[in-house]
Image: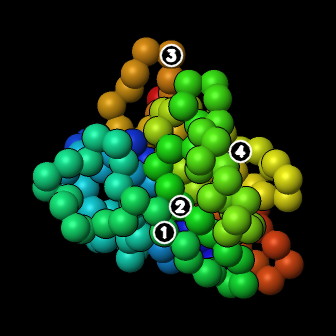
Amino acid sequence: MKIGVISDTHGYINPAAFEYLDDVALILHAGDIGNPDIITELEAFAPVTAVLGNTDGFPFAGSFPESELIYIEGKKIYMTHAVINGRHRIPSVMKEISDIGPDIVVFGHTHRQHAFEEKGVFFFNPGSAGPVREGTRPGVGVLAIEDAGFSHEIFYLD
């Protein structure tokens, strides 16, 4: 199963992102959505599972959870917006992840791409698919989940 992973749109999706979402079965949005229309745009490609980010306020009240645990093709995927703040992992979030024991953690917040394994858990952040911030490159990710495992790709949008 091919899954699009997007984050930190802040009310705008870089049009180049849609090229990589064209043939996915599901889209995961890791927060800082910015505008409800973003979800509608993404749903034109595939069903969307989203979590709230730290800047998602009133328009999203009650619409999405702060974190989500989903099972896809036998893989346990935990989604939350912020795992890393600055250069540091957030201890309370890391404890929650340890308690849950997911295979994959999808997150955003940093506007920077991350793909690393730690203590048997794969952490994946595609970076921001929205407005460009100084020092970052916009991106979108794709996870391919199969019986034997999974693979990932990050596509830069600049």
| Circles 1 and 2 in contact, beta carbons < 8 Å | yes
In whole angstroms, how far apart are the C-alphas of marks 4 and 1? 19 Å
Residue at horizontal 13 percent and vertical 55 percent from the top: 59
Say which residue label 1 marks. 68
Can residue 73 be seen here? The reply is yes
Q: Residue 130 in the image: state x and y as whole percent.
A: 35, 38
In whole angstroms, how far apart are the C-alphas of marks 1 and 2? 5 Å
Q: Residue furthest left?
A: 59
In whole angstroms, how far apart are the C-alphas of marks 3 and 1? 29 Å
Number of the front mark, 2 or 4 = 2
What's the amino acid at mark 2? Answer: Met
Nearer-the-camera pick, 154 or 22:
154
Q: Label for residue 135?
A: 3
| Circles 3 and 2 in contact, beta carbons < 8 Å | no
Q: Label for residue 115?
A: 4
Q: Quadrant of the N terminus?
A: bottom right
Classed neighbour count for the residue bearing mark 2: other residues with Cα under 10 Å, few (<14), some (14–19), many (≥20): many
N-terminal-most mark, 4 or 3: 4
Number of the front mark, 4 or 1 = 1
**Mark 2, secondary structure of its residue:** strand
Q: Is residue 12 left or right of residue 120?
A: left
Q: Residue 117 in the image: state x and y as whole percent.
A: 81, 49
